[in-house]
Image (tube, rainbow, N blue to C red):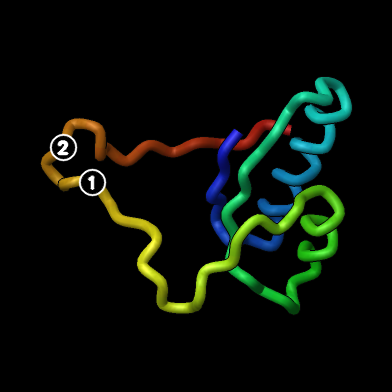
Amino acid sequence: MFANPPYDDDMIPRIVSKFDKAAKKHPATRMVLILPKFVTKEWRNKVKKSFDLIHTYQAGSHIFSGPNPTDIYSKNRNFTLKT
């Protein structure tokens, strides 16, 4: 799985819990979770218990780029996490 969730104090712990349940049921389950380095957020410890830090980008790094706005794949898609 790959997740770059909204940096939301409610959503991130829910995603981690969902991953933990899936990994417990299916131990081969893996996830890449992209988050900012918010050191004061309450969810940080929960993330650190379930994930290993692989890489940190320096602030201001250009790591995301969007598709061409006329690209047929760039339509806005909304996803809802079901718990």
Q: Is residue 7 left or right of residue 29?
A: left
User: Residue 79, position in %: x, y?
Assistant: 50, 36
Q: Amino acid at mark 1?
A: Pro
Numbered label tally: 2
Q: Which residue is mark 2?
A: 71
Q: Is residue 53 above or below residue 57?
A: above
Q: Is residue 16 above or below residue 20?
A: below
Q: Are marks 2 and 1 in contact (CB under 8 Å)?
A: yes
Of residues 75 and 55, the one drawn nearer to the viewer in this rendering: 55
Quadrant location of the N terminus? Answer: top right
Residue at 88 percent across and 28 percent down: it is 24
Q: Residues within 10 Å of mark 2 (few under 14, many from 20)?
A: few
Dot label at residue 41: none
Q: Which residue is mark 1?
A: 67
On the image, which quarter does residue 23 sit in? top right
Mark 2 secondary-structure assignment? loop
Q: Residue furthest front?
A: 54
Q: Is residue 65 left or right of residue 27?
A: left
Q: Residue furthest left?
A: 70
User: Residue 8, position in %: x, y?
Assistant: 62, 60
Q: Is residue 12 left or right of residue 64?
A: right
Residue at 75 percent across and 37 percent down: it is 19
Q: Amino acid at mark 2?
A: Asp
